[in-house]
Image (cartoon, rainbow, N blue to C red):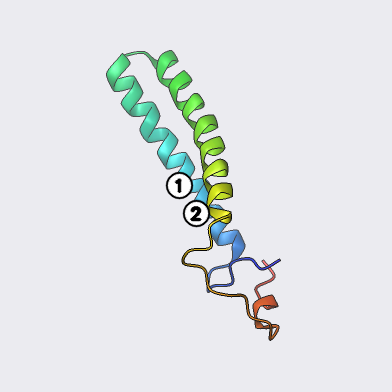
């Protein structure tokens, strides 16, 4: 299976994804708190948002995995199998 073989290590991509999700959840919490004036409601909204966005992202990615538009054909030379070990 060919994964993304760019300049960035997989561990860096994962760290960026986690930090982005944390930042997004903090934003949702703060906006929810601002609009509801309730820490409890804001926490419930932020938690729900994390769960629903993970599910929606998964479904979105699965849908796009079936679309060939914009994809380059895989190399048969073996170059596509090289990558970082992170």
Vertical order, 71 against 35 (above or below): below
Dot 1 surroundings within 10 Å: few (below 14), some, or many (20 or more)?
few
- Describe residue 31's horizontal placement relative to residue 12 as left or right: left
How many numbered discs sit on the rendered protein?
Answer: 2
Q: Quadrant of the C terminus?
A: bottom right
Q: Residue furthest bottom?
A: 77
Name the quadrant containing residue 54: top right
Name the quadrant containing residue 81: bottom right
- Describe residue 39's horizontal placement relative to residue 31 as left or right: right
- Describe residue 9's horizontal placement relative to residue 44 as left or right: right
Q: Residue furthest left?
A: 35
Rendered residue at 44%/34% (across/down): 25
Which residue occupies the foreground of this view, 68 or 86?
68
Vertical order, 31 against 64 (above or below): above
Name the quadrant containing residue 27: top left
Tag 2 secondary structure: helix
Distance Cα–Cα, label 2 vs label 1:
6 Å
Residue beneath label 2, please?
A: 16
Rendered residue at 50%/26% (across/down): 47
Rendered residue at 53%/69% (across/down): 8
Q: Which mark is residue 20?
A: 1
Percent position of residue 48, x then y: 50, 25
Dot 2 surroundings within 10 Å: few (below 14), some, or many (20 or more)?
few
Q: Quadrant of the N terminus?
A: bottom right
Which residue occupies the foreground of this view, 61 or 33?
61
Percent position of residue 49, x then y: 47, 29
Tag 1 secondary structure: helix
Rendered residue at 47%/19% (across/down): 44
Vertical order, 67 against 76 (above or below): above
Percent position of residue 14, x then y: 57, 54
Percent position of residue 78, x then y: 70, 83
- The answer to whether the residue labelled 2 contacts the one labelled 1, judged by CB atoms less than 8 Å apart, is yes
């Amino acid at each position: 299976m060919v994964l993304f073989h760019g300049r960035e290590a997989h561990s860096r991509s994962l760290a960026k994804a986690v930090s982005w999700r944390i930042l997004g959840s903090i934003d949702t919490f703060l906006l929810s708190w601002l609009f509801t004036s309730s820490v409890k409601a804001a926490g419930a909204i932020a938690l729900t948002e994390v769960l629903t966005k993970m599910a929606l992202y998964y479904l979105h990615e699965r849908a796009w995995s079936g679309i060939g538009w914009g994809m380059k054909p895989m190399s048969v030379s073996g170059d596509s199998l090289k990558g970082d070990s992170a």
